Image (cartoon, coloured by chain):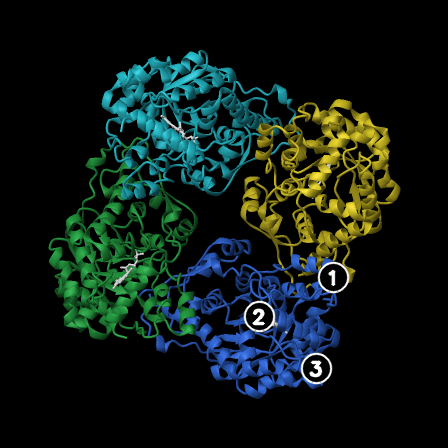
Chain colours: A green, B cyan, C yellow, D blue
Amino acid sequence: MTTTKRKLDHINICLNEGVESSYTGFGDVTFIHNPLPEVHYDEIDMEVNFLGKKLKAPFLIASMTGGHPETYEINKNLAIAVENAGIGMGVGSQRAGIEDESVADTFAVVREHAPNAFIYANIGLPQLIEKGVEYAEKAVEMIDADALAIHLNFLQEIVQPEGDRNAEGGFSIIRDVASELKVPVMIKETGAGIPREIAFSVREAGVKAIDIGGKGGTSWSGVEVYRIADELNRDVARDFWDWGIPTAFSIVDCHDVLPVVATGGIRNGIDAAKAIALGAKIASSALPFLKPAKYSVEDVERKIRYFLDGLKKVLFLTGCTHVYDLHKTKIFVSGLLKEWIEFRELDYLELVRRRFHDF
Amino acid sequence: MTTTKRKLDHINICLNEGVESSYTGFGDVTFIHNPLPEVHYDEIDMEVNFLGKKLKAPFLIASMTGGHPETYEINKNLAIAVENAGIGMGVGSQRAGIEDESVADTFAVVREHAPNAFIYANIGLPQLIEKGVEYAEKAVEMIDADALAIHLNFLQEIVQPEGDRNAEGGFSIIRDVASELKVPVMIKETGAGIPREIAFSVREAGVKAIDIGGKGGTSWSGVEVYRIADELNRDVARDFWDWGIPTAFSIVDCHDVLPVVATGGIRNGIDAAKAIALGAKIASSALPFLKPAKYSVEDVERKIRYFLDGLKKVLFLTGCTHVYDLHKTKIFVSGLLKEWIEFRELDYLELVRRRFHDF
Amino acid sequence: MTTTKRKLDHINICLNEGVESSYTGFGDVTFIHNPLPEVHYDEIDMEVNFLGKKLKAPFLIASMTGGHPETYEINKNLAIAVENAGIGMGVGSQRAGIEDESVADTFAVVREHAPNAFIYANIGLPQLIEKGVEYAEKAVEMIDADALAIHLNFLQEIVQPEGDRNAEGGFSIIRDVASELKVPVMIKETGAGIPREIAFSVREAGVKAIDIGGKGGTSWSGVEVYRIADELNRDVARDFWDWGIPTAFSIVDCHDVLPVVATGGIRNGIDAAKAIALGAKIASSALPFLKPAKYSVEDVERKIRYFLDGLKKVLFLTGCTHVYDLHKTKIFVSGLLKEWIEFRELDYLELVRRRFHDF
Amino acid sequence: MTTTKRKLDHINICLNEGVESSYTGFGDVTFIHNPLPEVHYDEIDMEVNFLGKKLKAPFLIASMTGGHPETYEINKNLAIAVENAGIGMGVGSQRAGIEDESVADTFAVVREHAPNAFIYANIGLPQLIEKGVEYAEKAVEMIDADALAIHLNFLQEIVQPEGDRNAEGGFSIIRDVASELKVPVMIKETGAGIPREIAFSVREAGVKAIDIGGKGGTSWSGVEVYRIADELNRDVARDFWDWGIPTAFSIVDCHDVLPVVATGGIRNGIDAAKAIALGAKIASSALPFLKPAKYSVEDVERKIRYFLDGLKKVLFLTGCTHVYDLHKTKIFVSGLLKEWIEFRELDYLELVRRRFHDF
Ligand SMILES: Cc1cc2nc3c(=O)[nH]c(=O)nc-3n(C[C@H](O)[C@H](O)[C@H](O)COP(=O)(O)O)c2cc1C
Ligand SMILES: Cc1cc2nc3c(=O)[nH]c(=O)nc-3n(C[C@H](O)[C@H](O)[C@H](O)COP(=O)(O)O)c2cc1C
Ligand SMILES: Cc1cc2nc3c(=O)[nH]c(=O)nc-3n(C[C@H](O)[C@H](O)[C@H](O)COP(=O)(O)O)c2cc1C
Ligand SMILES: Cc1cc2nc3c(=O)[nH]c(=O)nc-3n(C[C@H](O)[C@H](O)[C@H](O)COP(=O)(O)O)c2cc1C
């Protein structure tokens, strides 16, 4: 099976089947309502800088697609909406575009229609291990990217019968890319999360940000269950459906090590706000944007507004005038997430009992 | 849409749809049964003073309505029952009555039929911010009120497309009203709760009591879901259905700062007793009284008796001779509520292991 | 309604309706299996002494009935089975038998058919408050009892429209009865449990044992729900269905103050073993014996065997040669019961990490 | 009923009925995903030594059958698959083969078809208590075993009406067998678990390994429920369905006392990995292999591959190059299992916060 055909399968499965895993950890986070917020809703400021670019709100549509003619429209719709909203987006893995120039336009269309937006390139670590720094450079050039996300998706690789099974040399190629590339490099999981230890080691390697891609949203072992023909392999893939570090756990783990982008089960503006309150710089979401992008620019725009409206309402109701005031707002953390924080020997009090904004 | 029309919509939704949110926190509170209570049931005393008036029991029917001709009967039925029972009540937001004198009688009917009862006026903070102290004075005069409740309902405002979005100046207008009004001023949430920090700051401002209006009963974002035409706005409102500080959490937060009235999911006498045991001075309930008030005085009276009978039975079974002995009775607190108390750095032992009455 | 008629109603409701409440606390107790018990099953000894009499096993059928001609057979069947098994039983409240001599035989039949068994008399505290020590003496004489249980059932009284509402003087009449009666006096709840504080105070009063009658089995507010005609009263009774101190909590509370008999939701031999492991001297059960007693002696005997077989198997599987070795056997306590132990400032370690038998 | 007939009943019940109990404790264990594992999947090494033999992976098919002509094929299929996979297996209790030489071949077939595999003999402690060391020697000879498992199954014996009820002398016969036998001796539970105290005492007795046979998989009291004719006995057996120490608890208890084999509810490679991560040397499973073994060698081989593939994928995704690196990999332990570790006064930190491999 070719890469492009596989990519199309993935899109169709994500459009039509249940592919999500359970428990992001956000259910263990409660905001403390401020009934007297002393804020004018219309003056709330969500603008932030991320890796050198300005975003009207700390929100990105996460890497999804490209590489097959049918994905051209999807990326175009996403790009226009993102440009209009003043946010940013990633493209899907550019391997197909590098290996087959005829589909490179399905990626390039993004920059074409989003000349000013923050756009990040995307390439898998297994490909870099095999092909070297050059692949990374090509990916960035293809879309004139503001940054490159190297995705780490060994869970998916390992459950795919045809998947890449070699992770050796990953760390050193990340270091090479980080030092040679002209744009900043992020690492990005795709649904199994990134632990604190890895955050520290990639910071050493020159990585500038982490998309923690945590468990609780799209499950790539789940997606593969629909594709695997052999029953035994399918059963094993199913056992790994819920494998990984929940999104909230992973944010907590990495937030004080490198700037964190949070994907994985962020499904509305309250989730986005929780991700930021736990320490992320950017909230980001993939799956909810796939269907809208199949339809129209307007549908994508509505979905963006849905997320940003919810986020802004949280700001208002917690008395924040700027979105990063969430970093100083108290939150109530309980249950498993609290157990995790204790297990990690992080400072629970520092994490949750921060100064209540404006009091 | 006019204010009066909107108010009628609210009543009808509350009468006919499911509008409650989940988890008040009362499920985490257990009374310690006293099998040998040394009390005569008929001699149990529930009389209390609240803001200068005597109540035969620490129970109020919370602010609901007024402002549309159809609400006249509702308020009249409530008023007669309340007068007979020797308790008190609030009226709904008086904005409509102030802006349109022709409906002022739908509020004034309360004092007419409850000449001796404790009656509190009600006006929204957004209106005060816009219109100033005069509005507060008019509200009090309209019903010859014993107190004024300024309601804080920014959750509802913010999910309503037509809602008020400015909370700036809230604190200072509260201070002005508190210093200029002749009756005591309370602040009152309407279902999202009031945190400890706000309790401290409004005490500074001269506020005399707090109706914490916590989460777990009527949800105003929930009510709005039934009214919002636009799908996107409706979806956002639905995400906020369960927003807020659970009633029990909010009582615990405010109980030692100012006298607390507790509304939000108090559905029977045991809930009322738990609210008081956690530190509230007054238990209060809105939604359960709406349907009875549509029918008759007798129905309201039966519902009052239902609450007070349950409350009195708790007193008997915990060996209390006066309702405020509940403040000294041990309670067993567990689960999330206990985690909250620890999070707030309140003294758990002081809160729960109080002297067991009569031993 | 006469006392005898009411008693018959109770029996019929208990036979035909769901009357149990939830959560005894036993689910939070786990025995630690001993795979190498070094015990011969047939040599396990369950014989104990209780209030001066020998019991072949620490198990009693708890107070249920008498007072109406139809209950004669029930008590007779229970008595024969109990005599044969070498255990003991209580009779139901003897008020009816005292007030109407014509039904005294429905109680006396017990001693007639169980000449050697441990039999305890039963009278309600409300009756003693009203009628004095003489009532207690009559109850004991009527059945030549080995002990008297004074039952405390104010929960039931208070939800019954016709119930007794005076608990004043309870403590002093208990003291009088305890000092004047020739047989030992127990106090006994009927499903709402007895807290530690009361255990201490009745010990002062001369009481010799406590049947803690905890929550989690038969609920007397639940039973009354089926009898109350008026909707309001019924609704209030239903709110109190789950009122009370769970059986396991109450055992833990009282076990080191006075000898404890445990009733309330003990439904098999494992529950009985847990009750004893938590510190009770005797396990006891009412509701499961009602239906068998309506049928035959054999049915009661089978049910007794069901409880004792289960209990003996626990002894074997935890390496106990005598039933009270359970008092020294480690148990794992978790969840709410553990929170209760901490709340009560009892020594968790002493309660659960006792010497493991035979190691 | 003869032993052989009973054994056949057991097989049929296990093939056709639900016989498992709930909660192994594995649900309270979470691996920490390593998104950058620096491992080549194909170079992961699962080879281990166990009691003097080499295993290609730390996995055994647990004792199940033999003793009836119909079981010949089952054991043959298991043996061939096990030999091919380079792992090992146990045979079922050899009592029948010792007492009736005509069925000895149903056991001997195993060694015949698995000349090199690790094979352990199996005999029940009750039989040894009765018959002495000779029985153990015969069992080992019959299959030229590498080790002998003495199974402790008093839960099953005690709920069987015809079961053995004497556990006295168990410890001393274990000591005798351990000192006289030429092969190492293990003790093995069959589904109710082994606590720490017993691990220490059998180590004293010369035992070399423990199959903890914990609760959460096949329940032998459960199996007996389907066989017991008498209702009373059946009801008692049912009460004990969930009796025992959960597998994860028992591993934690014994892991630092003797080498642990873990059976009881291990249903896939992730469970196997959790067992090892908690400290076991070998993961092992019975019930999932019964149906495949009824069909063919290939079905057994597929099932083995299913377990080993899952296990290897966990190694990859946690950055382990050898299966015992799991012993040094951090795991997140929460819930009841964490409460158990605290109850046992084991060092939680040492158990869970081990050095993260490769960082
Ligand atoms: C259809 C689809 C395709 C994706 N393709 C990629 C990809 O090529 N590269 C990548 O880094 N992540 C990819 N992802 C992962 C997402 O970027 C994101 O990390 C993950 O889905 C979790 O977020 P979600 O729960 O909001 O979907 C894809 C996700 C989806 C739904
Ligand atoms: C129909 C209805 C109308 C209400 N209107 C007002 C109002 O005008 N002003 C106010 O302060 N609260 C208002 N409330 C809120 C209640 O006073 C109360 O704080 C809240 O409903 C929580 O209590 P509950 O769960 O017992 O209903 C209203 C509640 C209901 C059910
Ligand atoms: C039908 C019935 C009648 C009872 N009558 C009495 C009684 O007269 N006096 C008393 O002390 N307890 C009485 N009880 C309470 C029991 O003795 C026992 O404390 C309670 O039912 C809890 O145990 P259980 O859950 O095993 O039923 C009665 C219980 C039942 C089921
Ligand atoms: C059909 C069957 C027969 C078994 N027979 C024996 C036996 O003879 N001896 C023994 O030690 N264990 C025996 N066991 C127990 C298993 O070895 C194992 O300890 C237990 O079933 C728990 O593992 P599981 O949940 O994977 O089945 C048997 C299990 C099954 C399912």
- Nearer mark to the viewer, of 1 and 2: 1
Tag 1 secondary structure: loop
Tag 2 secondary structure: strand
> The residue marked by circle 2 belongs to what chain?
D
Q: Nearer the viewer, residue C2 or B194?
A: C2
Q: Which residue is mark 3?
A: D98
Q: Counting other residues with Cα less than 10 Å from the Cα at mark 1, is it few (<14), some (14-19), or many (20 or more)?
A: few
> The residue marked by circle 1 belongs to what chain?
D
Q: Which residue is mark 1?
A: D230
Give the residue type that dot 2 points to. Answer: Asp
Mark 2 and mark 3 in contact? Answer it, CB < 8 Å: no
- Nearer mark to the viewer, of 3 and 1: 1
User: Which quadrant of the render holds ligand 1?
Assistant: bottom left
Q: Are marks 2 and 3 on the same chain?
A: yes
Q: Which residue is mark 2?
A: D211
Question: In the rendered view of the protein, which quadrant contains the C terminus of chain C?
Answer: bottom right
> The residue marked by circle 3 belongs to what chain?
D
Q: Nearer the viewer, residue C137 or C307?
A: C307
Q: Earlier in the sequence, mark 1 or mark 2?
A: 2
Taking the image as shown, residue D72 lies to the left or right of residue D354, namely right
Taking the image as shown, residue D342 lies to the left or right of residue A10, namely right
Residue D81 % position (x, y):
51, 82
Q: Counting other residues with Cα less than 10 Å from the Cα at mark 3, is it few (<14), some (14-19), or many (20 or more)?
A: some
Residue C238 % position (x, y):
59, 35
Disc 2 C-beta below 8 A from ligand 4: yes
Q: CA distance from mark 1 to mark 2?
A: 32 Å
Q: Earlier in the sequence, mark 3 or mark 1?
A: 3
Q: Counting other residues with Cα less than 10 Å from the Cα at mark 2, is it few (<14), some (14-19), or many (20 or more)?
A: many
Q: CA distance from mark 2 to mark 3?
A: 23 Å
- Nearer mark to the viewer, of 2 and 3: 3
Give the residue type that dot 3 points to. Answer: Ile
